[in-house]
Image (cartoon, rainbow, N blue to C red):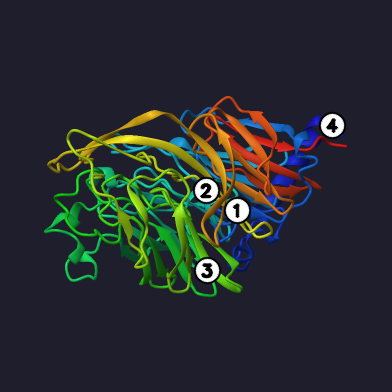
Amino acid sequence: MSRFAFALALAAALTVVLQAQNITNAQLEKGLADPSAWLNYSGDYGGMRHSPLTQLTPANVGQLTVQWAFQTNTLGKFEATPLVVNGVMYITGPNNTAWALDARTGRQIWSYRRDLPEGMNLCCGRVNRGFAVLGNRLFMNTLDAHLLAFDMKTGSILWDSIIDDYKLGYSATSAPLVVKDKVVVGIAGAEYGIRGFIDAFDANTGKKAWRFWVVPGPGEKGNETWEGDSWKRGGGSTWVTGSYDPPLNLIYWGTGNPGPDLYGDDREGDNLYTDSVVALDGDTGQLKWHYQFTPHDTHDWDATQVPVLAEKVIGGVNKKVLMVANRNGFFYTFDRGNGSLIASRPFVKTTWAERIKPDGRPDVKPGTEPTENGVDVCPDIAGGTNFMSPAYNPKTGLFYVTAREVCATYYGWEQEFVQGQYYFGGNGQRSGGRGYGAMRAIDPANAGVKWEYKYYTPSMAGVLSTETNVIFGGDMDGNVMAFDAASGKNLWHFQTGSGIFAAPITYMLDGRQWVVLGSGTTVYAFALPSK
């Protein structure tokens, strides 16, 4: 076959693959049952990031090598999780870039780059965490607070809906979550005095279906927990993707800190529903239950961590649980049907509270509020963990998370709110040395730490679990790693050359199990050597 004929055949094959994409709600509910697919941010609706694939084992994972690497030519932190559908990988990057790649070779099929306006107020990097998919469409949030629908085949935009006004400080960085015929999105911008919410849009038309206000207004339950009109600039961002339980039709989503971050005297009260996990009706967005991790937070401890759903035998009873390793340093296990707390315990050094009391509130230590002169508290502003995705392995019954052991001196002061300006009310400076990171395995039944593998530096990488008890993670020094899920033994590592902020995925194509991760400006694909 001539090169020209081969190129035509390859192009035709790719066209057929792209035309065949038609992801259904049933496929989304089955999650990772299709070994060739990764269909949402967490792999499945439950946020477990646990793959049933078995080709990679503790015995052979050390043989993983790079099979292809895609250079994005885009600077910035790479925090996205790719989707894989019918042999095609769809991935987003910093500054609202995106690509469709051949998942076998890394060959680019199409690309997209959004023209972003000047003057956007952005807190923590020009990042994006990925697509959602339904039918033949992809959905992406944008830094200027829009939701886009893409044609999967061509990368062209089918509709463009405004989430809110970026000029008021709103931005959007999380991967959307498809629930039935709706695309659910979060918002960022608490550091600029926005009023947080969770939105749902019609997947076909882009029309807004419902909005849940994280910060309730006058006449709404919870508004009484805000002093005066502080609710108007109350923060409560929702900048990491939530989870979904189809039988219960409940969306679980973490909410961010109140504003200003480190000064609370102007917003007396618990400041609901910030720093909480909220359970919302999937059809209407109505609040069914909530739990607030850090009432009246003055340490910037967003509770936007991914809620992980699983079934777990606790006390001899099989329970449907929701698990969260929280930025405030505590691990929590809940009954996800009603939000009742089952277990809680610190999983990092935590000096601001002794314990979680029987009524579910933290037993806060005196003298831990930020002051103008500064006060030392653990964990630091970035928290015991942060946005990085955890994983849960049903075989070991353990929850795996990238933990951070860092403390800070917190300073707080009164700050006048000015539209469009940074609204933090203080500052935080690392104290007590460099600190470190760790991969930690936690037993959700009692919230106890079973093992850890220490990283040299505090790290921000996500986690992947597999059926063969191999756990993948990474560190800020650029190492992607594999561990034994039962013991924590380090089995393999590869130096990517850049700190890792994303989470790995895995999928099966042509009889080979692939592991893919973005780091720096590059997407790396690993597999065992071909036979």
Write down the quadrant of residue 430 in the picture. top left
Above or below, 338 relative to 418: below
Q: Residue furthest top?
A: 497
Mark closer to the observer (3, 4)? 3
- Between disc 1 and disc 4, whose residue precedes? 4
Toward the viewer: 261 or 420? 261
User: Number of labelled discs?
Assistant: 4
User: Relative to 459, does residue 332 appear above or below in the rendering?
Assistant: below
Distance from the alpha carbon under mark 1 to that under mark 4 = 43 Å
Where residue 325 appears, as percent x and y from the top left, is 47, 52
Q: If you read the primary sequence from the N terminus, does the residue marked by circle 1 or circle 2 appear first?
A: 1
Q: Amino acid at mark 2?
A: Ser
Find disc 4 in the rendering and name its residue. 2
Dot 3 surroundings within 10 Å: few (below 14), some, or many (20 or more)? some
Query: Which residue matches tag 1?
Result: 49
Q: Which quarter shows the C terminus?
A: top right
Can residue 105 be seen here? no
- Marks 1/3: CA–CA distance: 15 Å
The residue mark sitting in front, 2 or 4, is: 2
Cα–Cα gap, marks 1 and 2: 8 Å
Q: At numbered mark 2, what does the secondary structure look like: helix, strand or loop?
A: loop
- Nearest the eye: 19 or 486: 486
Q: CA distance from mark 3 to mark 2?
A: 18 Å
Q: Position of residue 392 (x, y in %)?
A: 60, 55
Q: Residue at x 64, y 42 (%)?
A: 472
Residue 245: which disc?
3
Q: Specify few, some or many for label 1: CA neighbours under 10 Å numbering under 14, 14-19, or 20 or more.
A: many
Circles 1 and 2: CB atoms closer than 8 Å: yes
Judging by the rendered image, the residue that carries numbered circle 2 is: 389
Kind of residue at badge 4: Ser
